[in-house]
Each structure stands twice: as structure tokens, then as C-alpha cells.
Amino acid sequence: MKTKEEILDINLNQKEFYNSKKKNLPTKIWSFFRSGLLSSIRKEVGIQEMVYSKHKEWLADLSTKKVLDLGCYSGNNLSLYIAENSKEYIGIDLSDIAIEKLSKKLSHLPNAKALAVDFLSDDDFPDSEFDIIYAYGVLHHFQNVNLLIDRLNLKLAKDGVIISYDPLETSLPVKLVRILYRPFQSDKDWEWPFTKKTFQSFESSFDIVERRGVIGKIKWFFVIKLLPISKSKKNAIGKAWNLSDWEESSHSLNKMFSCMHLTMKMKKKSIN
């Protein structure tokens, strides 16, 4: 397991990667699958809308909240919503190019700012006492989960909440594909999809208020799309599968681990 100093060095490479966006061919193919084909399925059956709606529900009333938008790049789908509704908003990312773009989007909001800093750096990022840490597609970038958890606890206020969304590597077909792909991956040094052990680490360190698995059975939807039936029937099947993934994963670990992505609302444990 890498030390904090080693990870800070890796993060310099990560910054350069996201600034240049230079990907090798295998990484481009995987990105096309993830952002192209899967994104298409997410839109068709309403996964994206479901996830963002749930996140807004978890965020609740932001008017008195100090929020950290962790690893937000130039702004994720909810960055502006959070910034416009929270008492104080700080968006951070390694990429200074991305943060410059986000700063322009936030220029009309006196309560909001964007910083190009490393979350793990005490010198660059001393801010703390966050009521909410919103981490969309971010927590899996830390190989040393214990270090990450300690840092999250340090930055959270009492009863603070984390809202996360990350890829899982617990479904056998997904795990096999990732094993074959990993040796050729441009960003393998900072891409660590959640394993069962990762989930257990978060489960033991925080109170998981609610969790939802995404893209479980629905990952086979491409088979349905090949069938000679109407588009409306295909979408109806897809939406039913998606709802099954969404509801059952909230109480069944087996169902959750069959999914490709996991979103959670976690609360800082009370210190007695």
C-alpha cells in the first residue's frame, strides 16, 4: 500500500494526465465503452436522472451548509446546483486548467470558489469542517483507502455527510474485463474501482445511511436491444431491470455487488 508521500507524487502525474487528456488506445476504447455505450444506456432507461435526483434528496437543504465538491474537474452535473444553493461552496481538483474553467462558472457567486489543490496536502488545502463532501467519481482514485478515510474524517464537521458515486469491481464479468484491460491502462496508477474489501472499509468507518447499486442486471440490456421488438418494449424492460437493481441493492449485498457502480450517503460516526 502506497504512503501519503508516494500518492502525492502520483497525483502530480494524475494532474498532468487530466490537463493533457492524453490517452493510449486501450484507454480510449474503454472510455468509449464507459462514456459512450454505457452513457447511452443510462440515458435511455433513466439511470442518470435517478442518480442525480437521489443526490439532490441526500443533499437536502443546503442553505446552512459548507460543501466541498471533491475532484469536481471543471464542474460535474450538480456543481452549479450545489454552489448556488449552499452557504459556502469549495470545488477542488488537481487540474488547474479545469479549475480555471470552473472559476469562471462560479464568478457570479460570492459564496463559492474553486481551487486547484491536492486533497491530501496539508499545505495546499487546510480547509475543514465541511458539512457535506460531494465526491462524484472520485473516491476510487485513492489506492490507500485507510489514508483516504482518515482524511475524509479530518475534513468533515461533526455529523458531516459524504455523498459518493464510484465504480465497483465486484461483478465477475466486469472484474475479468478490468483484469485484461489494466496492464494497458493509461491511468491505472490512480484508478482503483471498489472491491468488497473497499466497501467494508467504508462500512466500518462511517454510518452508511443509504446505498444504491447501479448497472447490475441492466448491463446486459444490449442483448435486449438486439431483439426484434419495439423500442418502447425494450425501454420498458430496461427500466424494469434498472428499478430492480436500484431497489434491491439498497438491502441486498449480493445484488449490490453484481452492479458496476455504487452510490452512497455516509455519515461521520459520532464520538462518544
Image (cartoon, rainbow, N blue to C red):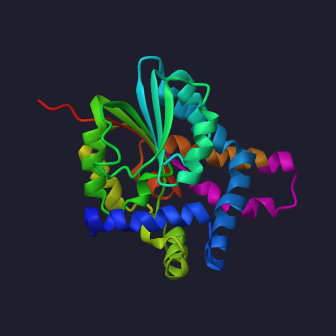
Residue 46 sits in quarter? top right
Residue sitting at 54 percent across and 66 percent down?
Answer: 17
Q: Position of residue 74 (x, y in %)?
A: 59, 46
Depth check, front residue: 221 or 184: 184
Numbered range of the magenta stretch: 211-234
**Numbered marks: total:** 0
Q: Is residue 218 visible?
A: yes
Depth check, front residue: 43 or 132: 132
Q: Is residue 111 above or below residue 143?
A: above
Left or right: 118 with respect to 47?
Answer: left
Residue sitting at 42 percent across and 47 percent down?
Answer: 252
Q: Position of residue 188 (x, y in %)?
A: 47, 72
- Position of the C terminus by quadrant: top left
Depth check, front residue: 32 or 214: 32
Q: Position of residue 8 (x, y in %)?
A: 34, 62
Left or right: 81 with respect to 196?
Answer: right
Depth check, front residue: 140 or 86: 86
State yes or no: residue 266 in magenta.
no
Residue placed furthest toward the left: 272
Q: Is residue 113 above or below residue 3?
A: above
Q: Is residue 249 visible?
A: no
Residue 153 sits in quarter? top left
Q: Is residue 71 above or below residue 107?
A: below
Residue sitting at 15 percent across and 32 percent down?
Answer: 271
State yes or no: residue 230 in magenta.
yes
- Position of the N terminus by quadrant: bottom left
Q: Is residue 133 above or below residue 145?
A: above
